[in-house]
Image (cartoon, grey):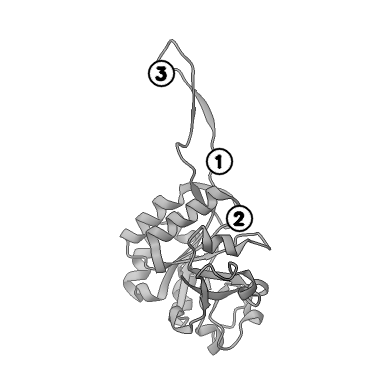
């Protein structure tokens, strides 16, 4: 298995020449710089208008965040104007909470406790970390139908259930999917690769510069490659 890495920079100061990079948007982002123009810019709560301004300014790719969650028409409009190669979906997720309730309708003689979910799932988060109630796999399917060809998924993959959900996303999206940590400063990247089947990882700068140390142990047939062309 070949693993692609890029750096997920917090700001302009973490962008390095010739390092494949996605950078979180800030209002002070110097979009006129060539180094920024070559990156993918990751939006949080910023509007469709911000995405349009960045793309008009020559940014190579913009990952749209909460704006696409709140308005189903955002991605189709941007895709029609700028094309799928220059757009992506930024999707922070967490495990959806399972709630329990008494079912007294199906059989009046019994009180049956039923879960809100029949199987584990990730749900999409808003920029402030609040759950949206939208299941990530269903939203991805909808966005694929609307023409999205690139997804940056940010998740804290902590256990076997998360690893299985990750593998399911990889199976669905293939090389359309980039995976990044959400908040965890020390994710077990080797497990993401070995068991979550991750093949494209966007890592914060501190982890990116240690990326070769984070790979599975030798003999696992996993190698690391970095390619600027993959971000084009």
53 over 102 or under it: above or below: below
Q: For residue 102, say whether it is visible.
A: yes
Q: Which residue is mark 3?
A: 105
101 over 118 or under it: above or below: above
Residue most toward the top? 109
Badge 1 marks a residue whose secondary structure is: loop
Q: Earlier in the sequence, mark 1 or mark 2?
A: 1
74 over 105 or under it: above or below: below
Q: Any mark on residue 216, and which?
A: none
Left or right placement of residue 110 versus residue 206 in this view: left
Which part of the image, by quadrant, shows the C terminus?
A: bottom left
Q: Any mark on residue 128, and which?
A: 2
Front residue (pair 136, 50): 136
Q: Any mark on residue 97, and which?
A: 1
Residue plotted at (46% across, 70% down): 1
Front residue (pair 160, 205): 160
- Tell me where residue 17 appears, x and y as whole percent: 58, 88
- Tell me where residue 104 appears, x and y as whole percent: 45, 17
Q: Would you call the spot at circle 2 few (<14 residues within 10 Å), some (14-19), or many (20 or more)? A: few
Q: Earlier in the sequence, mark 1 or mark 3?
A: 1
In whole angstroms, how far apart are the C-alphas of marks 1 and 2? 17 Å
Residue plotted at (66% across, 81% down): 13
Of labels 3 and 2, the one closer to you: 3
Left or right placement of residue 36 versus residue 187 in this view: left
- Tell me where residue 214 appears, x and y as whole percent: 62, 69
Q: For residue 45, say whether it is visible.
A: no
Left or right placement of residue 216 versus residue 80 in this view: right
């Amino acid at each position: 298995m070949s693993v692609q890495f890029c750096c997920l920079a917090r700001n302009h100061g973490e962008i390095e020449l010739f390092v494949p990079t996605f950078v979180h948007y800030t209002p002070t982002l110097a979009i006129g710089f060539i180094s920024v123009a070559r990156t993918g810019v990751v939006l949080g709560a910023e509007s469709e208008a911000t995405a349009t301004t960045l793309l008009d300014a020559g940014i190579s790719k913009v990952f749209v965040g909460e704006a696409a969650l709140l308005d189903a028409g955002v991605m189709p409009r941007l895709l029609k104007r700028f094309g799928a190669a220059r757009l992506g979906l930024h999707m922070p997720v967490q495990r959806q909470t399972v709630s329990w309730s008494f079912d007294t309708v199906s059989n009046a003689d019994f009180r049956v406790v039923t879960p809100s979910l029949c199987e584990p799932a990730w749900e999409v988060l808003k920029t402030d970390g609040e759950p949206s109630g939208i299941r990530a796999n269903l939203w991805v399917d909808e966005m694929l139908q609307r023409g999205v060809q690139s997804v940056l998924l940010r998740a804290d993959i902590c256990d076997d259930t998360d690893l299985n959900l990750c593998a399911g996303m990889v199976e669905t999206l293939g090389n359309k999917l980039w995976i990044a940590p959400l908040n965890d400063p020390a994710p077990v990247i080797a497990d993401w690769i070995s068991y979550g089947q991750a093949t494209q990882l966007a890592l914060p700068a501190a982890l990116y510069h240690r990326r070769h140390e984070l790979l599975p142990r030798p003999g696992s047939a996993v190698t690391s490659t970095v390619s600027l062309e993959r971000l084009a």
